[in-house]
Image (cartoon, rainbow, N blue to C red):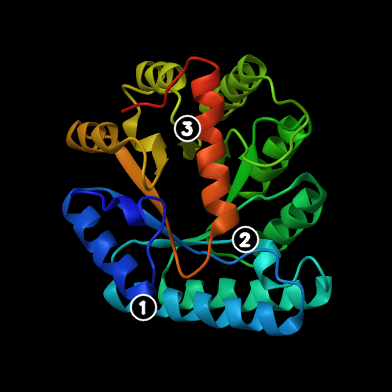
Amino acid sequence: MGINMEDRWSLPDLTGAMQWCGGRTRQHIRCTLAVIAEFARNPEEAQQALMLHLAGIRLAGEQSTGISFSIKPSAIGMLFDHGEYVRNISLLFHEARDWGVPFEIDMEGRPLVEDTLRSALELASEGGPVTLALQAYLDRTSRDLTVCMNAGITVRLVKGAYLGDTDDFTTIQKQFRTHAENLISTGNSFSAATHDPVLIEWLREEMHDHKNLIEFAFLKGLAERTKMEMAEDGWKVAEYVPYGPGGQAYIQRREQYLTVLERLGRSPVP
């Protein structure tokens, strides 16, 4: 599947995203859809994002593709009205559960972490699967990891794309590995979202006889060859597929990631 460079990081609309995911399904790559919407500043913006999420969840459920949906809390009210955020994420969670669509929550900037974790715990207590991204660059993640595992929340372990407690590449790499080791030791399923060749190679060695317990999650626009090779080799592979208009902040984070790697003399998996 070739990548149109104009749509490298995201797709313009839900129709295009579903078509893309259909192609990925044939390649044995699962998709996680995410509406490009964040930092809603008023009820109107949050309501617009809510409607976009609901439409996507329903279409994914109708097509029974195994596509999951990931939500950014800032898109649906967290920044300006916690009560509205709680109502909105509860509505999305129950809609996804009714349609059989796996439900995921992205982790954003450090000020939002505690409330995001709390809402994930509340949803998990109601029954139904919840996946939560946890960021390796935060000092609190070891504690949050234990809390999530005890609550039955599936962890998507990421390095972090906002402002963390450290921006040192080697430190974050070590912390990611430590958190992954803790997850592996429990025997629970988890998702590893990284493009780091060193971490991916280590995880493949560690999990070679337990492929069913780990899903490797990649971004749309990166690791094209690696996704295909790993899927063909029997690994569970997922691709994070944002869609919708705008997305400048999201794209900026992706481009910044590549710039930092280049400055460090590193590169993501091909």
Please give the residue where the numbered disc 2 appears in the rendered image. 72
Residue at 35 percent across and 56 percent down: it is 7
Residue at 76 percent across and 66 percent down: it is 78
Quadrant for residue 203, please give it: top left
Quadrant for residue 55, please give it: bottom left
Give the image location of residue 49, x and y in percent: 59, 76
Q: Alpha carbon of mark 3 to alpha carbon of mark 2: how far?
A: 19 Å
* Quadrant (top left/top right/bottom left/bottom right) for the C terminus: top left
Please give the residue where the numbered disc 3 appears in the rendered image. 194
Identify which amino acid the numbered label 2 is placed on.
Answer: Lys
Give the image location of residue 107, x and y in percent: 65, 50
Q: Alpha carbon of mark 3 to alpha carbon of mark 1: how far?
A: 28 Å
Q: In the picture shown, does residue 60 fall above or below 263?
A: below
Q: Earlier in the sequence, mark 3 or mark 2?
A: 2
Which residue is nearer to you in this view: 208 or 29?
29
Q: Earlier in the sequence, mark 3 or mark 1?
A: 1
**Residue 206 in the figure: left or right of residue 30:** right
Q: Mark on residue 78? A: none
Q: Are marks 3 and 1 in contact (CB under 8 Å)?
A: no
Identify which amino acid the numbered label 3 is placed on.
Answer: Thr
Identify which amino acid the numbered label 1 is placed on.
Answer: Leu
Q: In the picture shown, does residue 85 fall above or below 165?
A: below
Q: Alpha carbon of mark 1 to alpha carbon of mark 2: how far?
A: 19 Å
Please give the residue where the numbered disc 1 appears in the rendered image. 59
Q: Secondary structure at mark 3?
A: loop
Q: Secondary structure at mark 2?
A: loop
Tally the numbered discs.
3
> Between tags 1 and 2, which lies in front?
2
Residue 151 visible within the image? yes
**Residue 47 in the figure: left or right of residue 154:** right
Residue at 47 percent across and 78 percent down: it is 98
Q: Residues within 10 Å of mark 1 (few under 14, many from 20)?
A: some
